[in-house]
Structure formats: structure tokens, C-alpha cells
Image (tube, rainbow, N blue to C red):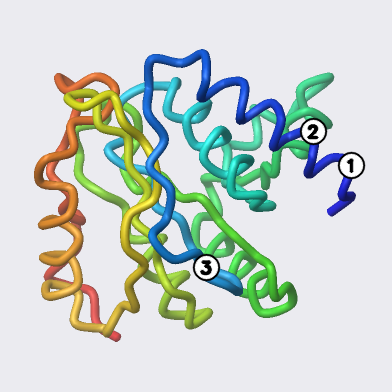
């Protein structure tokens, strides 16, 4: 990424965290190489602003998945410039394969995934798990916690293929994280958790 752009983003992030009532929680030990960043609990569109602030502060070149409708017209170049990858939800199977391929080709690939839809109440989607296992990527637990007005990056874990055990670890971390709007928080539990095999 262009170093001037990196510096500009860092400056914007610094200003945001100074002016925001939210507190930034940085990684204890920054992780090198490609990975997945979970953004949870996903309870508000403001989560996107927080995640950009987190990523730009850490000088990360993030990518994220968005429905293809967000990339129409003038919004397209802006969304792509912010790291967006358009997704055709009617072809969800191809999404995982495409992201796995991108991760294999780029040693600095960082994908932000919100495993639960905003206000969906239907549980977490398994895409992040499939991508992490398929591309052998570690998973960093990013968070927003309205109860403490803090947001940032928690531990980075390696998934084992034992879905229930891995999700128990994830549930433990997010147990006290409320999200921006606690009333929309859902339990970190995949709809097809017991059926997933790796």
C-alpha cells in the first residue's frame, strides 16, 4: 500500500480516537502475516467506523466482504478503496473459495468478517471458520464493547477443526462484550455448528 495513504489513514485514526468517547484497545503483541479479523458483536453500522479506526491505527490494509449492491455507481470505487470485496449472496459457496485464493496469493491479506448480520438474531455464519481452515489463517478476535466504550483487538487464535471447542473459546472471549447496541447482541453460536466437520 502507498506509504502516504498509510500515513494519512493513521492520522485520521489518531484524530478519531482522540475525539471519540470510545477507547482503543491495541494488540498486546502485533501479529505478522495474513489473518482473519472477527468484528463482533455486530450490532450497529457504527461498527464499521470503529473497525476502520482500529485497522488504520495499526496500519493494516484490511479487506471486507459486502453485498454487491453496495458497490453500484459512485459508491463502488469508494467501497473498494476502503477494502471492500463485492459478494453475490446467491453464490455464497464461491465466496469462500475466492477469499481463500486471495489469502494464499497475498502475504499481507487481512480480512475483516462480521460473522453475525446486523440485528439478524439468527446466529453466526460459518464463512469465517471455513475461510480460516481452508486458507490456514489465524483468527484475531476484534470487538466493540458498549459497556466499557472500548473497541480493539483481542487475542489471535488458531482454529483446530473441533468446531464446538473452538467456538467455546470464542464464546468465552465475547461473553462480556455487548456491542455498540446491546439490545441487538446475539450469542456467538453458528447455526450449523454441530454439523460442521473438518
CA distance separating discs 1 and 3: 24 Å
Residue 105, image quadrant: bottom right
Helix, strand or loop for disc 1: helix
CA distance separating discs 2 and 3: 23 Å
Could you tell which of marks 2 and 3 lies nearer the N-terminus?
A: 2
Q: Is residue 1 above or below residue 137?
A: above
Residue 102, image quadrant: bottom right
Quarter that holds the N terminus: bottom right
Helix, strand or loop for disc 3: strand
CA distance separating discs 2 and 1: 6 Å
Q: Give the labeled residue for mark 3.
A: 35
Q: Residue at x 65, y 36 (%)?
A: 68
Q: Is residue 53 above or below residue 180?
A: below
The crowd level at tag 2 (other Cα within 10 Å; few <14, some 14-19, many 20+) is few
Please name whichever residue, 30 or 80, is drawn nearer the observer in this view of the structure: 30
Query: Is 178 positioned to the left or the right of 87 in the image?
Result: left
Q: Position of residue 70 (x, y in %)?
A: 65, 27
Q: Give the labeled residue for mark 1.
A: 4
Query: Is 112 positioned to the left or the right of 156 in the image?
Result: right
Helix, strand or loop for disc 2: helix
**Labelled disc at residue 102:** none
Q: Give the labeled residue for mark 2.
A: 8
Q: Position of residue 160 (x, y in %)?
A: 27, 84
Which of the two discs, 1 and 3, sits closer to the camera? 1
Q: Are the two marked residues, 2 and 1, in contact with CB atoms closer than 8 angstroms?
A: yes
Quarter that holds the C terminus: bottom left
Amino acid at each position: 500500500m502507498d506509504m502516504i495513504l498509510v500515513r494519512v489513514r493513521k492520522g485520521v485514526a489518531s484524530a478519531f480516537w482522540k475525539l471519540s468517547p470510545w477507547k482503543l484497545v491495541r494488540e498486546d503483541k502485533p501479529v505478522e502475516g495474513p489473518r482473519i479479523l472477527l468484528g463482533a458483536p455486530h450490532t450497529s453500522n457504527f461498527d464499521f467506523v470503529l473497525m476502520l479506526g482500529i485497522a488504520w491505527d495499526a496500519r493494516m490494509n484490511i479487506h471486507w466482504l459486502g453485498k454487491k449492491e453496495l458497490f453500484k455507481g459512485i459508491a463502488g470505487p469508494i467501497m473498494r478503496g476502503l477494502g471492500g470485496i463485492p459478494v453475490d449472496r446467491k453464490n455464497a459457496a464461491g465466496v469462500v473459495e475466492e477469499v481463500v485464493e486471495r489469502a494464499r496469493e497475498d502475504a499481507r491479506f487481512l480480512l475483516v468478517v462480521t460473522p453475525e448480520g446486523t440485528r439478524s438474531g439468527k446466529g453466526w455464519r460459518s464463512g469465517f471458520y471455513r475461510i480460516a481452515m481452508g486458507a490456514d489463517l489465524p483468527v484475531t478476535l476484534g470487538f466493540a464493547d458498549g459497556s466499557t466504550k472500548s473497541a480493539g483487538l483481542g487475542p489471535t487464535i488458531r482454529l483446530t477443526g473441533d468446531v464446538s471447542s473452538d467456538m467455546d473459546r470464542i464464546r468465552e472471549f465475547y461473553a462480556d462484550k455487548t456491542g455498540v447496541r446491546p439490545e441487538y447482541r446475539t450469542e456467538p453460536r453458528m447455526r450449523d455448528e454441530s454439523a460442521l466437520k473438518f
